[in-house]
Amino acid sequence: MIAQVKEQFHRLFGKDPLIVSSPGRINLIGEHTDYNEGFVLPAAIDKKIVYAIALNGTNTCNAYALFNDEKVSFSLENIKPTKGWINYLLGVVYQLQQLGHQIKGFDCVITGNIPIGAGMSSSAAVEGGLVVGLDHLLGLGIDRMAMARVGQLAEHTFPGVKCGIMDQFANLHGQKDRVMLLDCRSLEFQYFPFEFSRDYKIVLVNSMVHHSLASSEYNVRRAQCEEGVKVLQEFFPDINSLRNVTPEQVEQYKHKLSPKVYDRCLYVTQENERVTKACAHLQKNELKEAGALMYASHEGLSKLYEVSCPELDFLANLAKEREEVAGARMMGGGFGGCTINLVRMDKVDEFISFVQTRYQEHYGKIPEVYVTSIEDGTKVEA
Ligand code: GAF
């Protein structure tokens, strides 16, 4: 991909670009917890977006996306939201300007192999690649967490998804063969060696479903959690997010919450507990126990949080049938996209052929499967 963007860049703009690689992410457990100030356990992966980028000495930005053969241009003045992938670029430039940075015109060519709408966060990769590219070219000196915040705010203000910080964080902080436990309240994080990679592989199975509901329902979930916090604050005045709340406290005031808000709060508070437990198990290489928590996470996402879909439920159930799978669950925002499966290395091929056959028999389409590795976060290539 690097050679490809370089060549296109030369052809279009006739000079040498900076090359930036920006990965997608997986999340082992901790879904929809980030915007509730909870815990997540993500990692950057080998699927990525690649930028070739250079300043152009004008007030205009020109971007050419190889993945859909689309060229777009925009002026640095008066940036406003529009439609499509360009929104992520606009959002990043706008948020950098809001921080007082003097952004200058640039040319870029972008390509990538992160499947769109598969829950692997191609959008955070587009954002992270541009922030790192502009930071490098303009010498802005922004730290990585502040960069993540730029991407998150770009997402809030341009496509309008009120996402948490997980995707942008993972994209910008990833390290090869390490998973990260992030506390989304303090933004403190720890790296853990990915010990089980000696015996297990992370296998993503794409349901090939892209629900148009994803962004609108995402914001609804966030609002329901906020509503729950408001109600519970009456009884626990010190809380300011679901992070401070236990499942027992949600149970205790069930009668004060609407049924949907109760379900959402119960899920989030349970999921937070699962993340810390799963992390402890993974550190001791107790895959079976960690895997059981992944299945429980899926169950909660499906029944209580209602962000799964029949296809994802089907895939999670298929995984349960296989003794080589330690655990599986839907991953990311939901309503489609992938399941993440921890599969014993020697049985990966068998698992893939089983899942593809059964899914095709049931849904008439073959799910794409990605056997991933854990890689570094966004970086400028030498
Ligand atoms: C999406 C969001 F962008 C993340 O912030 C996170 O909330 C995730 O859905 C669900 O865990 O990827």
Image (cartoon, grey):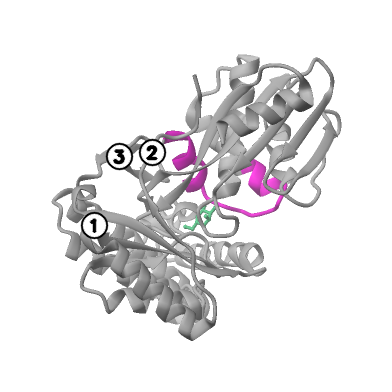
Residue 98 appearing in the image = no
Q: CA distance from mark 1 to mark 3?
A: 16 Å
Q: Position of residue 204 (x, y in %)?
A: 41, 60
The residue shown at (24%, 55%) is 200
Q: Identify which residue, 165 or 105, lies in the foreground.
A: 105
Amino acid type, label 1: Met
Q: Position of residue 39 (x, y in %)?
A: 37, 51
Identify the mark at residue 345; answer none if there is no mark.
Answer: 1
Left or right of residue 183, residue 86 in this image: right
Q: CA distance from mark 3 to mark 2?
A: 6 Å
Q: Provide the residue span drawn in magenta.
A: 153-173
Q: Which residue carries the number 2 mark?
A: 375
Which type of secondary structure does the marked residue at label 1 adopt? Answer: helix
Select label 2 or label 1 by which is in front: 1
Left or right of residue 292, residue 133 in this image: right
Identify the mark at residue 212; answer none if there is no mark.
Answer: none
